[in-house]
Each structure stands twice: as C-alpha cells, then as structure tokens.
Image (cartoon, helix red, strand yellow):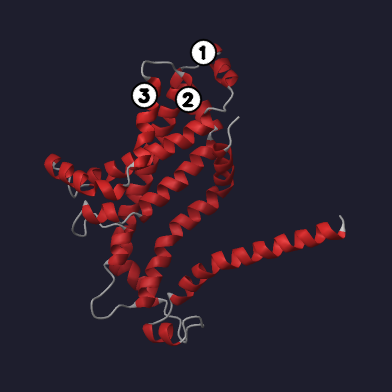
Amino acid sequence: MSLGSKIKRSIVHIFMVLYMLVTVFPLIWMIISGFKNNADLFSDPFGIPSEWRFSNYSYVWSAYIQRGVLNSLFFTILGTFIVILISAGAAYAIIRFDFKHKYLVFMLILSGMMLAPQCSLIPIYKMLSITGLYNTRIGLLIPYIAYRIPFSFFLMWSFMINLPVEVEEAAYIDGSSIMNTFFNIVLKMSKPCVATTAIMTARYIWNDFAFALVFTEGDKLKTIPIAIFSMRSATQTGWGVMLAGLTLAALPMIILYICLQKYFVSGMNAGAVKG
C-alpha cells in the first residue's frame, strides 16, 4: 500500500471514529445521567454522579413504565408481524401473478405513503368512536398497521422483484404449493428485507406518541411514550428519573438493531438498487 493510500485510509478511520463518538456519546450520557438527581444533573451535567442512584431505575420501572413496556411490546410485536405478513404477501402477489387492475392496486397501496399520520388523527378518531373501537387494543393497532404497510410493501417489492423465479418454478415442479413456496422459500430468501422491515416498523410503533395519545385514555393502554410524558410535572420534574426511563425505553430497540444489523444493512442496500 502506498503512502498516499495509507494517509487516506487513516483519515477515513479518524472520521469514522469521530462519527461513532458523536453517535454514542448522547446514549452514554443519558445512561449515566439516569443515576443522578436534579442537583448533580444541573451542577455538573457531564460529570460522574456524586452518588450512583440505582433506585432511579427501579423506581421509574415500577411506578411509571412497567405497564407501558408491556403494552408497547404487544403493539410492536403483533403490529410488526402483521405488517410483514401483509406487505410481503401483497408484494409477492403483485410481482408473480397477473390479475385485473394489477397496477391500479400497486399505485393504490403506494398512495398511502403520501398521507401524513397527523392529517388523519381526527378522521380516524371519529371512525374509532363510531365503531366502538376507541380506547381498545385493536383500535390502536389498526392505524399502526395501516400506516406502515405502504412503505413496507414498497421495500418488499423492490427486493422481491430481483429474486430468481427459477427457484420457485423448481419448487412447483416438485409439488410445492403457492403458500408453501411463499413461506418456506420466498420469505427465507428475503431475510434481509424482512429484518429491515421489522426494525423500521418496530421503531415506528414503539416510538409513536400521537396515535397513542389521541386514540386511548387512562392507564390501561398506556404505551412507553405516554408513560414517559406522564413523568413531567407542572411544579417539579425529576430529570434523572426521566432519563432513567428514557434509557429503559430505548434498550429494546437498541437490542433489536444490534441483533438484526447485518440483515438491516444488506436489506437497505438490496432494496435501494434494482437491476
């Protein structure tokens, strides 16, 4: 390797290290600040706590976010599973089968990407109230699924359109049914895209605030963002306790991304380039 190449490589490595530090530092600061009280946090925001208050984490878990975590896990896991199933099935059907108004259905599904969730809060609230689904699990789950299907469908379509049809034809010759081919062959070949869709859908549902605030009331269906929001007080807020809650709320998505990051990167690259 020439001297110029070594210098360029070193510069790239330095920039990558700096980028990593800038990305990771806020997370580390949030975790450490979760052990502080208000006095330590405001007097020395970037320092080590004078007393490590592990009670902040246990208190915020038992008093605020325990129910919110369970509710968010329910909506996130079930919503992500349904979105992947519907999006993958619709993308596969559009690509492999010919039927009437095929491209109209394709454009109709993609048109959902043009509507911002905030614009539909009032209409959805009215529909949920009329149908008796307001403040119910299914009433909150349906909007989550509906708003994630268009983008997830497009991601699945852009990936599956490059899958070799010869593999499926060989499966049909061996007597495999359409459903068996889809679940055991197509979805397995689409693991990177499925993982990418799972991460992006789970992150959207887990972090949602507007739908959970408008379409539910009370503590029964309170999700993580609502639980964190309820920790604020008009007179005094325990910012160390709140940061502890934010740390616990962020952990599931961080763990999910770490577990699926290999598939996530390859899925994004494959979905972005066709041909």
> Quick one: quadrant of the N terminus?
bottom right
Residue 101: name its quadrant: top left
Using a 10 Å C-alpha cutoff, classify the residue at mark 1 as few (fewer than 14 neighbours), some (14 to 19) or many (20 or more). Answer: few
For mark 3, give the secondary structure: helix
Look at mark 1 in the image and give the residue it sits on. 175
Using a 10 Å C-alpha cutoff, classify the residue at mark 3 as few (fewer than 14 neighbours), some (14 to 19) or many (20 or more). Answer: few
Whether residue 105 is situated above or below residue 238 in the rendered picture: above
User: What residue lies at 39% left-to-right and 66% top-to-bottom?
Assistant: 246
Q: Is residue 260 left or right of residue 122?
A: right
| Mark 3 vs 1, N-terminal side | 3
Of residue 24 and residue 63, the one placed in the foreground of this image is: 24
Look at mark 3 in the image and give the residue it sits on. 104
- Residue 182, which numbered label? 2
Q: Is residue 160 left or right of residue 98?
A: right
Of residue 88 and residue 123, the one placed in the foreground of this image is: 123
Q: CA distance from mark 2 to mark 3?
A: 23 Å
- x and y, in percent, of residue 115 in the image: 32, 42
- x and y, in percent, of residue 52 in the image: 45, 81
Residue 235: name its quadrant: bottom left
Q: Which-is-in-front pick, marks 2 and 1?
A: 2
Whether residue 81 is situated above or below residue 44 in the rendered picture: above
Q: CA distance from mark 2 to mark 1?
A: 13 Å
For mark 1, give the secondary structure: loop
Amino acid under label 3? Answer: Leu
User: What residue lies at 56% left-to-right and 31% top-to-bottom?
Assistant: 189
- x and y, in percent, of residue 106 in the image: 40, 27
| Mark 2 vs 3, N-terminal side | 3
Please say if the residues under marks 3 and 1 sit with CB atoms less than 8 Å apart: no
Q: CA distance from mark 3 to mark 1?
A: 32 Å
Of residue 57 and residue 44, the one placed in the foreground of this image is: 44
